[in-house]
Image: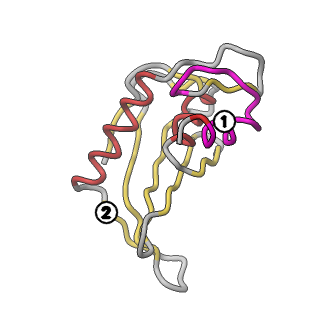
Amino acid sequence: MKGAVPRRVNITTAEAVLLSMGYKVFRETFDLVAVRHLENGKRFHTRIEAHGEPVVPKGAEIDVHIDYLGERSHSHGSRAEGETIRIEMDTLQDFLASAKPSRGAPGFIACPMCGKEMAAALFETHRKISHR
């Protein structure tokens, strides 16, 4: 399912949003890629077009789909439409629209849920302690 970033956000804020949703996040040259495993060999695969810049522009493309990982093979099928995917896309867009941007020094990240700024290395612990 294709969507669009609802407002301009910096890349660390988009990364924090995905982490808070339970994704593992990978920064690629031009995109922010995230995966979250589901049951029975399925996973959400999300890609946000960042254009290689530190700020994701409003309207940048978001792609969310479910991968069906093949047993013992690198090939897999995927599904791009459905109620589960629509709910995931809506949740991601809502989080991006309401996330508080990080205004601190490089390497710091703002929690999208409470706005508290911290070193990126501490974000996962903060999320587990404060928001679970």
Q: Is residue 104 above or below residue 39?
A: above
| Residue position marked by numbered label 2 in the rendering | 79
**Depth order, front residue of 126/84:** 126
Residue 76 appears at what percent x and percent y?
Answer: 44, 74
Chain part drawn in magenta: 112-129
| Residue position marked by numbered label 1 in the rendering | 126
Residue 11 appears at what percent x and percent y?
Answer: 60, 29
What residue is drawn where x is 59% and y is 34%?
130
Left or right? Give the position of 67 relative to 16: left
What residue is drawn where x is 37% and y is 32%?
93
Label disc, if present, on residue 94 of the rendered structure: none
- Res 79 quadrant in image: bottom left
Distance between mark 1 and mark 2 Cα atoms = 33 Å
Residue 27 included in the magenta stretch of the image: no
Mark 1 Cα shell of 10 Å, populated few (<14), some (14-19), many (≥20) = some
Residue 128 included in the magenta stretch of the image: yes
Q: Tell me the kind of residue under disc 1.
A: His
Q: Of callouts 1 and 2, which one flags the residue occurring earlier in the amino acid sequence?
A: 2
Residue 113 appears at what percent x and percent y?
Answer: 51, 27
Q: Viewer-nearest of labels 1 and 2?
A: 1
